[in-house]
Image (cartoon, rainbow, N blue to C red):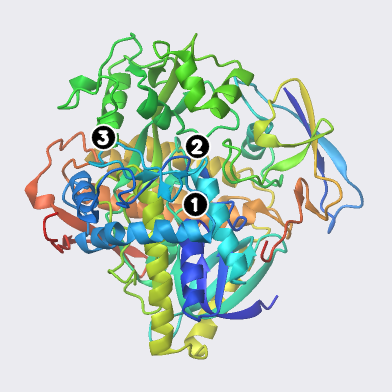
Amino acid sequence: MRLTVQRFDPLVDAAPHDETWEVPEYEGMTVLDALNWVREHEDPSLACRFSCRVANACKECSAVANGRTAYVCTVPAVGDVRVEPLPHKRLIRDLVVETSLGGD
Amino acid sequence: MTPTELRAAVVVVGAGAAGMYAAIEASRQGADVLLLDKSLVGRGGATVMAQMTVAAAIGHAEPDDWRLHHNDTMQSGKGLNDESLVRLLCSEGPDRILETRDMGVRWAADGDLLRQVGAPGHSRRRCCYVGSLATGIGVSNGLRKELRRRSVRTRSGLFVTDLILAGDGSCAGVVALDVQAGELIVIWAGAVILACGGLTELFARNSASVNMTGDAHALALRAGASLIDAEMIQFFPIGNLAPRLVGLDPIMWDPFRYQLGGRLLNGAGEEFVHNYAETADEGRYSASRDVLTYAILKEVAAGRGTPHGGAWLDFREVPFEKITALFPHAVAKLLEQGVDLRERAVEVAPMAHYTLGGVLVDRSLATSVPGLFAAGEAAGGAHGANRLSGNAITEAFVFGHRAGRSAAAHLAAAGAPEPDAAARTGAAEAAATVESLLGQNSSSRIGLPALRRELQELMWVKAGPFRTAVGLASAAAELESLAGEKLSAARVGSARRFNMEWYEALEMRNLLLAARAIVTAATERRESRGAHQREDATATLPEFAANSLVAMRDGHLSHSWRSVVRDPIEVA
């Protein structure tokens, strides 16, 4: 599959840019799996939030995949997928947006 | 960059069930508490992933007695349980569960009576649950309500990198990396409670969250506390292996199998568990976790595994209406993904699931370092060599509660002294070390995610469900090379905000120290007992009916044996 991710570090970059990787597929692979494949094999500096990996329990990995807001651990990684951070939230870096840091 | 300084009477590290309960109880005792999580409070950690049940002798489904729960827990632990911790776990479990109901945990109930079901190893129906496979999330949400009600201060995204020691050796606070801001923070505290879970992320196949990187174990060792039974890692026998399932907990087949039957078959389609256990399993789900793990991996090793290297779990003989009636939500998710249990079996395999050993504590949950406490999965001793299903969240509640209370009592007795020169120096040095990692070898090709994978494969093969002296010696040598030249050559990007490589380098430091402790303890235990299986020493030997302790002095790990703590109870 082909994974495209919007990269942006507001402290360094002038504007967001896309990066694309060819990721080897396997049965049941998710977009979060693909992001982790990129971190392991191509670019460990890619930033995204997650804890539970696949169970859809931690609710940390939300992003926009092919135009739809979703937990990326539930989105199948097939064909072309473009991922960008949630809109309307302060962007920290890459797919990571600000999350309440104090109490809930 | 000079770290920001904060203060709290009690700092709780880790915000799963144990940490949240500790924070609630310390706050009730009047202490000013700060609850931290390296991920998000109430989201990361192991608790939210727990779909199963919580055991306590409440006696709502049938007459029960905490002493019966105690007996069951002792039986399961194969002679290594600290009996004073088992007494605490089982005698206070009922009060804690009922208390969480008042806090807002919506336990499945009929009127005032909680529903309690059976589970393997429990002699009574005593396991409570929330919804359909929603226990962990239900527990987490209920405790978060209580935290808000009590206005407990919480901070997400703070990774505790070091414990700070005062000149007298007591714990004076923590150094933490604010992951989102990319800044270091020093938090001075009168007491610190480690509740940041286990070390399952050390193993290639594991069923827990990615956060379980042995942080509590490494922090405790570096501060001078000891680990108990570090070699004891529980492997969950039937974690989901294939197909990859989206949006479902990898251990969800356990309640399926427990409530529905379902046949466990080898690659040739034959039942096999009865060849390994004294009692035939026959789909009744009576074999304990360690026996099932052993049986499945032995079949795989003998060339009778499934295509992905596990066993088949087959529900095709179970009426589909029955499956749908019990697990409507899960069945719908399976069908969405093209997995129809009427047509296919799934592949399951053992996975690292729970850290049985952990930080050595006494019955007040205090470590040997004054002012330092541990609770939940991070604390060792209660489960011995095997944990009963349902005892983990009970442990989180009871030990969290007790640790919170003990920390408050420690403050009342010792006060929260001003940080002394040793504490200030230690904090500054620790912060400088963390800061120095940022941007390290930024052009290196060695990435931390790949290094972690290498470590996980190594631990799975050489220090996982089956161990030998030769394999462990080889693991020790490889760990040395990983901790030495490989880790120091790894790249850490220079981005300050949410730099995963930065905290992964710190997690790697913890994982490697925890791995060394496991390998040290597993080498010394030259027998097989419960979760620790030595292929070169298959018998359980009376001379090893003792707890193994690992401590660190001047960077070197030392090992010793301790008599198991006995605290006999009157027979129920």
Residue at the disc numbered 1: B485
Whole-angstrom CA distance, mark 3 to mark 1, is 41 Å
Q: Amino acid at mark 3?
A: Ser
Residue at the disc numbered 3: B288
Whether residue A87 is situated above or below residue B339 in the rendered picture: below
Q: Earlier in the sequence, mark 1 or mark 2?
A: 2
Front in this rendered view, residue B38 or B535: B38
Q: Residue furthest left?
A: B542
Residue at the disc numbered 2: B133
Q: Residue furthest front?
A: B111
Which percent across, then down, holds residue B373?
39, 70
Figure quadrant of the C terminus of chain B: bottom left
Q: Earlier in the sequence, mark 3 or mark 1?
A: 3
| B241 relative position to B44: left or right | left
Whether residue B2 is situated above or below residue B221 in the rendered picture: below
Whether residues under marks 3 and 2 lie with C-beta atoms below 8 angstroms apart, the answer is no
Which percent across, then down, holds residue B113?
40, 48
Whether residues under marks 1 and 2 lie with C-beta atoms below 8 angstroms apart, the answer is no
Figure quadrant of the N terminus of chain B: bottom right
Q: Secondary structure beneath disc 2?
A: loop
**Which residue occupies 16% across, 43% down?**
B527
Whole-angstrom CA distance, mark 1 to mark 2, is 45 Å
Q: Is residue A43 visible?
A: yes
**Which residue occupies 25% across, 17% down?**
B272
Front in this rendered view, residue B536 or B163: B163
Q: Amino acid at mark 2?
A: Leu
